[in-house]
Image (tube, rainbow, N blue to C red):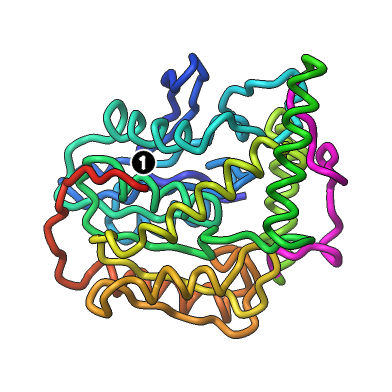
Amino acid sequence: MTQWLGNFQQQQFIGNAGVTISCAHMIQAKPSDALIIVNGRIESYLKYQDLANEFYRQGLSVYMYDHRGQGLSGRQLSNSHKGHVDSFDDYVDDLELFIDKVVLTHNKFFMMGHSMGGAIACQFLLTKQHVINKLVLSSPMHGIILPAPKLIIKWLTKLFIAIDSLLHREPSFVIGGHAYINVPFADNELTQCKTRYDNFRQIYQNQPQIKLGSVTNQWLQQALIATDTILKNAEQFEVATLLLQAGDESIVDNKAQDRFANSLPPSLIDKIFLQGARHEILFERDEYRQPALDAIFKFFNAPTSTPTKKHKAMT
């Protein structure tokens, strides 16, 4: 593994319901623009070392944090392998607190959300006062590829949540859910880059406390509510956005991404389709990763609009 560049520092703050949120930053010595990275499910900012270094080399100060229930942040369940959240609003509130408590004053502010982090970033920008000038969405979770029709999944999650409550037990895994599994590279759906995939898995081996398995029914219910709400309110979006879409996607729903993109005026959205890339575009082989990075740097360097800083209520 490479070394962190710049003045890399880690710290913690307290999020909703007293959950400890771990975060880190790399701040440029001179005045700079800032990038806030909102990572995906099961991830930790430890995984983003090489990517953060790329952005730091471009002159950006970089801020990262781990969502509640994963990475180095606190868990709310006794089984630390369960991917769980009480409400997606907690994720959004944690992001707001992170910016308020940790992020310093900079020239301009960019945000990048991957997968679940893309949904959190969108919900944040739709509902909170903010200073974000531009947004990058990498395989955003505007919808989830489900094993059955959404109405059936919603009914089942509601049923199992009710059973957990009736039996006074902590939230259970979704059907077929399980603790962390070290999936072999040949069987993974995330990336075709063996080196980056092996590095990601090695981090989990070195720091087993960040291992995470499947989601709970509560998480899935809240995720479906969040994605439905984002799409319903997408026309209210006012932040210039670059959307990176993977052609060989099997985790999130590209059609939902298209619906989001089509809800924005052309002046606000630029979508790049990467034929053959898997879900984790920025951890893919260089033939997919480098064009994505080039597009991001070009997007950040283009003229920037002033954020609206408006608070909107999603319906």
What residue is shown at x 26% (from left), y 66% (from top)? 240
Image: 71 above or below 113: above
When asked about the image quadrant of residue 188, the answer is bottom right
- State left or right for residue 108 relative to residue 210: left
Q: What residue sits right under mark 1 in the picture?
A: 26
In front here: 17 or 192? 17
Image: 82 above or below 247: above
Q: Main secondary structure of the magenta part?
A: loop
Report the label total. Answer: 1
What residue is shown at x 69% (from left), y 42% (from top)? 203
The kind of residue on which mark 1 rests is Met
Q: Position of residue 228 (x, y in %)?
A: 50, 55
What residue is shown at x 31% (from left), y 61% (from top)? 58
Q: Position of residue 36 (x, y in %)?
A: 36, 47
Q: Residue furthest bottom?
A: 275
- State left or right for residue 20 relative to residue 159: left
What range is drawn magenta here?
170-191
Q: Is residue 48 visible?
A: no
